[in-house]
Amino acid sequence: MRVCSVVGARPQFVKAFPVSRRLRDDHEEVLIHTGQHYDEELSGVFFDELDIPEPEYNLGVGSGGHAAQTAEMMRLLDEVIEEESPDAVLVYGDTNSTLAAALVAAKREPALAHVEAGLRSGKWSMPEEVNRVLTDHCSDLLLTPGENAAETLRGDSVRGEVVVTGDVMYDAVLAVRDRALDESTPLPLPDLRPDEYVLATVHRAANTDDPERLAGVLDGLAGIDSPVVLPLHPRTEAALDEHGLYDRAAAELRLVDPVGYVEFLRLLSDASRVATDSGGVQKEAFYLDTPCVTLRDETEWVETVDSGWNVLVGSDPDRIARALTDRSALPPKPELYGGGDAAARTVAALEATLGEGSSE
Ligand code: UD1
Ligand code: UDP
């Protein structure tokens, strides 16, 4: 079979690499990068580190408002899908790149397969929630990380077939873990001592675009004694600047540029706690045994909270500081989101849907 995989933003390079590897064993893949993320630290570094093949297309769409960015992606993707005429279009997660590819595929011949289908925050004001729901309804094959997400999709009466594959991000962590934990892996701040610092990431629109929330997060992170390392997403850097918070952040936190995946997993694994509003990082923390403090009021990854390894604290400074310094014993970890073979299951589900032989 012949599959066009569409990626564009940092977490999608991580999600796609185990699947692409597996797909290319027996099938033909055309990798399309929309160009949503374009800085070396948000894009190029992942291709280099994870040996992701050079995309056949880079659409170079870049940044913009939701409508302009999504529309430009759709216009360019439509031409590529027509030209390549794949059996399936494979999309990941919930970004504007995901939605653009989903809408294009839905109005053309190829089947649409969605990895990370069925996740919900229940918050329609979140751009990613709109992207997820619409992509799920466009999809012919909905691949979910767990049973909860599959249940959600059945409740939503989606028209496509739902298959539980497990989480491809677990495959990614397993593929890189040894390299990441190797002590020769350089860290951005060599003076950090394991278990004596907190790692933080912040980029969600709800936190960056609201000065009060952003100040609350900053106060919470600055309110603890241990060092807090914050690899700064460009969106957050711009927001700190705009809201007059940058100097305070630079004085109170250890700000670094966004780091590559291998380095990030090392930082995450060695941290005493991680504070984050990222989707992917909540799961990676769980896989690497680092307790997670989520800087949001809700999460799509509810199983991590139910397991006792993740706590939702919103942007309240006291709750953030308390959760980051809490040293209560954690419960034993259950197995969530499958056994690390989600990439193989994803490809098997595609084969079953399309018929193994299509256009091979
Ligand atoms: C996007 C996704 C979000 C995902 C995140 C992963 C949407 C709606 N949002 O958010 O779901 O969690 O990626 O990191 O798709 N910028 C740069 N360099 C880049 C890319 C962006 O400087 O390479 C700056 C630009 O000022 C841009 C801003 O960051 O306007 C936001 O980028 P964008 O891709 O629109 O959204 P993210 O916040 O990155
Ligand atoms: N990540 C990284 N370097 C960083 C921050 C994050 O490699 O400085 C990785 C992280 O390991 C995860 C992915 O980026 O695999 C998560 O991306 P992000 O938080 O931007 O998006 P989300 O998961 O919230 O959509």
Image (tube, rainbow, N blue to C red):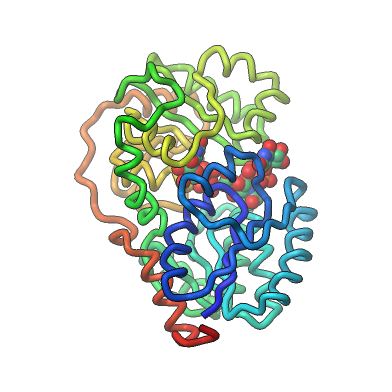
Q: Is residue 296 visible?
A: no
Please state which of residues 331 and 340 is positioned toward the viewer in this rendering.
340
**Is residue 210 shown above or below 93?**
above
What residue is rendered at 33% in x and 30% in y?
184
State the image quarter where residue 327 is shown. top left
Please state which of residues 345 and 285 is positioned toward the viewer in this rendering.
345
Locate residue 120, reporting x and y percent: 51, 58
What residue is rendered at 47% in x and 57% in y?
17
Please state which of residues 282 and 59 is positioned toward the viewer in this rendering.
59
State the image quarter where residue 85 is shown. bottom right
**Is residue 317 shown above or below 111?**
above
**Is residue 138 shown above or below 172?**
below
Locate residue 274, reporting x and y percent: 40, 33
What residue is rendered at 65% in x and 58% in y?
97
What residue is rendered at 30% in x and 24% in y?
194
Instruction: Describe residue 62's horizontal placement relative to residue 189 as left or right.
Output: right
Q: Is residue 285 visible?
A: yes
Instruction: Describe residue 125's horizontal placement relative to residue 306 as left or right.
Output: right
